[in-house]
Image: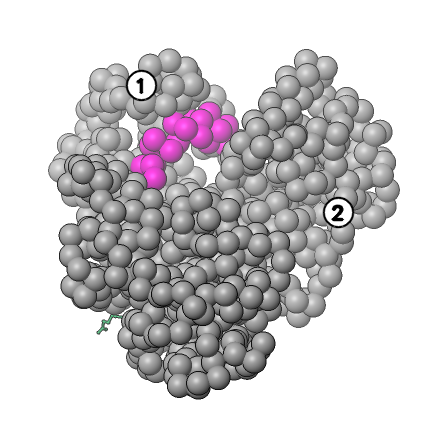
Amino acid sequence: MARYELVKRSVALITLTNPPVNALSSAVRHAIAKSMEHALNDPKVTAVVIYGENGRFCGGADIREFAGPLRGPPLVPLLDAIEAGEKPVVAAIEGVALGGGFELALVCHYRIAHFKARLGLPEVTLGILPAAGGTQRLPRLIGIPAALELITTGRHISAQEALKLGIVDQVTEQNACEVAVEFALRAVAKPLSSRRVSTLTTPCPPDLDALLEAVTMQVKKKARGAMAPLACVQAVRAAATMPYSKGIKRESELMATLFNSGQARALQYCFFAQRTAGKWTLPSGAQWNNSKPREIRRAAVIGLGTMGRGIVVSLARVGISVIAVESEKKLLETGKQMVIGMLERDAKRQGVSASLNLLKFTLSLQDLKDVDIVIEAVFEDMALKKHVFQELSKVCRPATLLCSNTSGLDVDALAGVTDRPHLVVGMHFFSPAHVMKLLEVVCGPRSSSETIATAMSLGKRMGKVSVAVGNCPGFVGNRMLKPYLDQATFLLEEGATPEQIDKALEDFGFAMGVFRMSDLAGLDVGWRVRKESGLTGPDIDPKNPPRRRQGHRYCPIPDMVCEQGRFGQKTGRGWYMYDSPGGTNAKSDPLIQNLLEMYRSRYGIQPRNISDQEIIERCLFALANEGFRILEDGIAARPEDIDVIYLFGYGFPRHRGGPMFYASMVGLERVLERLEHYHQAHPDVPHLEPSPLLKKLVACGSPPVQNWREHIKTMHSHL
Ligand SMILES: CC(C)(COP(=O)(O)OP(=O)(O)OC[C@H]1O[C@@H](n2cnc3c(N)ncnc32)[C@H](O)[C@@H]1OP(=O)(O)O)[C@@H](O)C(=O)NCCC(=O)NCCSC(=O)C[C@@H](O)CCCCCCCCCCCCC(=O)O
């Protein structure tokens, strides 16, 4: 767990050996304590270097240990003892120094960083704070404003930025360990007192209270209910106003309130769920670690609308040459200018030149003969997409992968019109595709494991969080959205307003309530889907009872809003009004209030007061209920996959863990009981009927979310 050796006859080199990230597990802490004791007691040793094996200094505390009882030497006294020692200790930082790893470096008397190293205190993203002295030492070293920014955001910084901030003493392009050993030898004769960061006085700005107040307000607004960022501000305040001995106690009190909280559990679950999601597996036995992806050098994107442009940029950013295809000269030219503009802005931000030589723009599919992969991003219309796939089949070499960026159409139907159904897969990007991290890789029944592996690996290369899902209307994300949206509109009918529903969801932690989100996405998209599904439009049988379609409750208010040409932000009017088309500042619109009142009076609906609790329960339990059905149907392999999709694609608050984790936190029994209650009240809403899997899990004693898989295994899989 840590190797001890004497180098250059007098330097004790302590190397952390806990792959993959040298996390500070109890065994590692134990080994560091023993090694330090040895080094401090051995008269031959004049200095110490701490280093991490495999080019990674230390990824911090072992997060997996947080779930069980705390064992082994506690970190704070261990780190205090390193700092207090009478022999100089130098941290040799390669790779990462994160969380407890950064705190370990802060107690060393000197820090040498490799130029590619990254440092940070990401604890806040795990719902906790840097509780091994990080909140007390960092402000003493770099001042309150910079420390606040790093601790409350968890941002990783480069070695160069760390040097500028005064966190590290030297940045090197050579082997950091060798440089640190030489550095340690030179440090032997120097006094250590000024190198013990905990003894420094925190440099404070004159307007400390005003600064802390302003940061608190800012952090509160961004945190959307998350507790850890605010606790971080309070801990840093202690560093500014208390001696270290008291500040460290405050840090530990604040940590104690966070450590066992549901938010910390949710955020730590998210950390592992994100990593689990990449580990796809098929019933055939093919999976992430036994299926080799193809190498992708040349790609093509068809369609240069918003999605296509974002996909081209995502590909070019990672060095893949892209041929972008449009059907008309004018569209091609507009798309081209926009893509170039996006890449140039990107390059300017990074201080490099834009790699425009990777791009080619064309009107002819014939230019796609030699590409490795095609991603189709044309209008969401099955007939059009089928036509494109037929043409691609004729033009592209037989080995070319054909992918569709459809947001919900049948990927297997597309595969069926090609000469290579095994090479067809869905790649559902989220808008804007160059910004949003989520990618649903939609596996058709005929997609080969190599095809899936290639799409997943391409997603990863583009910096996306890729999740493999099965093929059904709407896949995972958009399929679940329907019951969520339906509940929101039913609540409108019953007496709520868009403002009230959005506020309840935003107070819950969503980045945007459902109506503001719909305005942003464009209301016409759903309207078109409803028309195609026979739910609205001129072909609806007038004898159809009002507010009912296909035997179930139906709310036509969204159709009425669209009929008025209100398509959301892009038209300046939707559920809200905006200053102008494209505006983002949503204001209540009296016309929507009138429309709701007229609608209710037309159908004799007596509006009632609806509580925020009912809004949250109906919207979110209906969402999770569909998630259970998706698991039953084998459209998602694990609850973690669903949660990752909602976290990265739909703004679900991370400190709630995602819809499935949230359901488990509320208690499956309670979710079942509430769904039964609402279904009884609204028997014509099938989405409120509790799913068999939910009932099964409750009958099995509501196991933790990580164990649901055992209960799903026996069910059918589309993956
Ligand atoms: C390090 C990374 C940047 C590497 O990224 P990369 O993409 O290369 O690799 P992966 O992310 O895929 O990771 C590979 C593999 O490693 C696992 N892993 C990574 N980091 C950790 C970790 N820190 N612990 C455990 N496992 C880790 C990862 O899961 C992958 O494995 P898998 O099987 O899932 O594929 C990147 O990994 C990264 O960013 N890691 C996290 C870095 C981080 O967040 N560090 C901070 C950790 S928290 C911390 O350090 C806290 C400290 O401040 C110490 C605080 C002291 C705690 C004392 C407790 C006091 C409690 C008091 C309350 C008492 C109340 C009571 O009485 O009950």
Quadrant position of residue 485 = top left
Residue lying farthest left?
609
Residue at position x 40%, y 49% from top? 166
Determine if the magenta segment contains residue 516: yes
- Regarding ligand 1, which quadrant of the image does it lie in? bottom left
Would residue 698 appear left or right of 400 to someone viewing this image?
Answer: left
Disc 2 to disc 1, C-alpha distance:
45 Å
- What residue does disc 1 label? 577
Residue at 45% x, 49% y: name it: 162
Looking at the rendered structure, the kind of residue marked 1 is: Met
- Dominant SS of magenta comes to helix
Residue located 58% across and 43% down the image: 428
Write down the residue under mark 2: 296
**Which residue is located at x 77 percent, y 40 percent?**
298
Looking at the image, tell me whether mark 2 or mark 1 is earlier in sequence order. 2
Residue density around tag 2, few if under 14, some if 14–19, many if 20 or more, within 10 Å: some
Name the residue at the front extreme: 189
Asked whether, in this view, residue 7 is left or right of residue 452, the answer is left
Quadrant of res 695: bottom left
Please tell me whether mark 2 sits on a helix, a strand or a loop: loop
Instruction: Indicate the amino acid at tag 2.
Output: Ile
Q: Is residue 77 left or right of residue 719?
A: left
Per the rendered image, the range of residues in magenta is: 510-529
Mark 2 Cβ and ligand 1 under 8 Å apart: no
Which sits in the foreground, 118 or 680? 118
Total numbered labels? 2
